[in-house]
Every structure is written in structure tokens, then in C-alpha cells.
Amino acid sequence: MTRISKILLCLTLVTLAIWQLPWCYAFLSTKAAPNRFIMYSSLLNDFIIMGYEEERGFIRQDVAGNLYTEEAVDSLLPMFYMRQLVANEAFPDTLFGVAVTPLDVQHTSFNLRIRPSAVNGPVTELYFLLESMPKRVDLQMPEDAFRFTGTGIEFITMETNSIDAAKSARFTQMLHDKGFAFPPRKVSGNPTTMKEYDNGYLLIDANGKVFHLKQTAGQPYVKALPLPENVEAEQIFLTEFRDRKLLGFLTDRRHRCFAILSDGSMTETGIPSYDPTTDDFTIIGNMFDMTVRISSPDATRYYGLSADDYSLLKSYEPAGESGQIPGLSFTSPYDRYVRPRF
């Protein structure tokens, strides 16, 4: 028995070493601030790269290597550094011939991050539908939850744990009338009161069609969103940005990325490829342009997009950006299981 215990102890120590030593080595050998902050500037028509280098300290430069002062970067990224420019009384009155105020910047600026774990992780299949036209300014969490079945939608009153048959029938009938096929393949929403308004849910039904579902004055609102030609919907993501220009983003089976506008129409973005199951997606936008960062297991790429039509303005792929640390791990953003993997 003692011998078996020693063997088990040795195996445990070896496993822990394989698990932790690569991380410890990376932690001890990593240089300060290895990740650079990169943003697209429409005024410069280039990317501005900011980060710390051991020899030169904190640097601010463009892709060609031209260096800029902190004040110059503030002026080249006026939408991002609006507060500093206002404090310095240097915020411009117009940009690209358009009158701009700090309030406009606050209203049109947004950011969004979508991790692979959000797509690959486990799904509860129990959702909350807020009121999109509340009587009060503050949003309130509902007293019921809902779930999809193979034939409809069921609302469950949480206090009694009973099904609200009347409400379930209303929403199910409305979805049927709009051509929705149960059960949905994908459901995307943001059920929280920490936002200014509620846009409900974006759904991909059993036949691959896209729908918008929300609750308006207690009644169901369902709208079918036509897909562009030769587009097979794969993943969908709801957005609730302050300016309400966008309803969300959609990717298809060819890994093309589409912006869903507030009227339900869709337009293809200039992002060449985006696979939500493997890529980390970050977007920082304003009324003139957007900076998109897509981090794949093999590389990180940046794209500058136009805020008018989401076309590609410029792209940049820095050398040597990788967050992968080799070794043993037990979880992964690429699946839903806890198991040892190298």
C-alpha cells in the first residue's frame, strides 16, 4: 500500500509539474507589456501602435516606424482620446467636414469583444426576455424565464415554477406566423439591466433563417431578417450600442462577417475571415471608423473599417503576436469539456 501511495504521489507531482512549469517559465521570462495597443486612425490613414519596449521605453508609432508624441496621438485619435482633448481645450469642432461635439462622441462610440468560449461553452437554454418599451427609464428583470422546445416557446413563472400558457401561446403563434421553424440553432441576447435599452434576441431557426424577437408592451415582436444571396448563417451576435445603428453581427459558413443594421438589412464587412469558434474578436468603433482585432491561434490581425459601409480601409498583421503557452491544461475555449490536454 505504501508503494502504491508513493507511485500515486509521484504521478501527481509529475502531472502538476507538466501543468505549471511551462506557465511559470513564461511568467518569469515574459518581458514587460508584450502586447501592444493598436488602433486605426482615419486622420493618418494608418494604424497607430503603442506599447513598451525594453530599449526605447513606451513608444507610439505607425506601421512604417514613424514616431509620434503623446499629444500627437491624442489628436490623431480624437474620438478615443476625446476627454483628454476636451481637458486640453484641443477637441476639434469638425472632422472630415462633419460638426462633432463630445456628446456625439459618447453617443456613437462603442466596443465589443467576443471570445471563442462564448460560442463553444455550455448553453443553459433558459433565457430572460426584458420589456423593450418599459414605462420607467430603468430596465427591470422579468418575473418569468423562457425556453424553446421542438414545437414552440414556453414562458415559466419563476415564483411558482409553472408555465404561463397564455403568454407561451401568443409568442409561439407569432413566431409560427412569421415562418419560424423550431427549435432554433442559435440564440443571442443580452439579458441584463446594465444597459440603456433592450433589443431582445437574434435567432437562427432550424432552417437557417434569421429572426429578431423582442417583447413590446407585453406583446411579441417578431421580424424575419432576409439573408443576402448565397449566405448560410452560422453564428449570430446581438449588439445594443448606444446609437442603435447596429442590431448585431452574423457570420456564415464561409467565415464571412456581416453587420446587421437596425432596419434588419445585412451588409458584408471588409473583414476577410472570422471564425467565432477559434478567433478572439474585438471591435472599437466611432462615427467615422472601426478598429477590429481578430486573434487566431496562429496570428493576430487588425482591420480598419469604414463606419459608413463597413468596407475595409486598411489591414495590418504584426509579427510575433501570440498568446499561446505550451503545456498541459484542463480547460479550453475551443470546447465544453474539462479534461487533460497538451
Image (cartoon, rainbow, N blue to C red):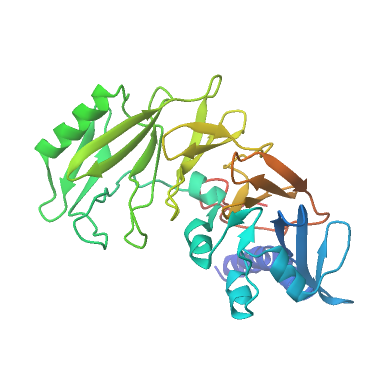
Q: Nearer the viewer, residue 335 or 158?
A: 158
Q: Is residue 48 left or right of residue 100?
A: right
How many discs appear?
0
Screen quadrant of the N terminus: bottom right
Q: Position of residue 35 (x, y in %)?
A: 73, 65
Q: Position of residue 218 (x, y in %)?
A: 17, 44
Seen at 53% across and 67% down, the residue is 102
Q: Is residue 134 left or right of residue 296?
A: left
Seen at 26% across and 32% down, the residue is 149
Seen at 49% across and 49% down, the residue is 118
Q: Residue furthest top?
A: 230
Q: Is residue 238 above or below residue 38?
A: above
Q: Confirm whether residue 336 shows in the render.
A: no
Q: Is residue 72 above or below residue 109?
A: below
User: Can you tell which quarter of the image residue 87 is in?
Assistant: bottom right
User: Can you tell which quarter of the image residue 186 is in?
Assistant: top left
Q: Nearer the viewer, residue 214 or 336?
A: 214
Q: Nearer the viewer, residue 173 or 260?
A: 260
Q: Is residue 278 above or below residue 158?
A: above
Q: Is residue 19 left or right of residue 210?
A: right
User: Can you tell which quarter of the image residue 150 is in?
Assistant: top left
Q: Position of residue 245 (x, y in %)?
A: 46, 46
Q: Position of residue 105 (x, y in %)?
A: 53, 62
Q: Confirm whether residue 199 shows in the render.
A: yes
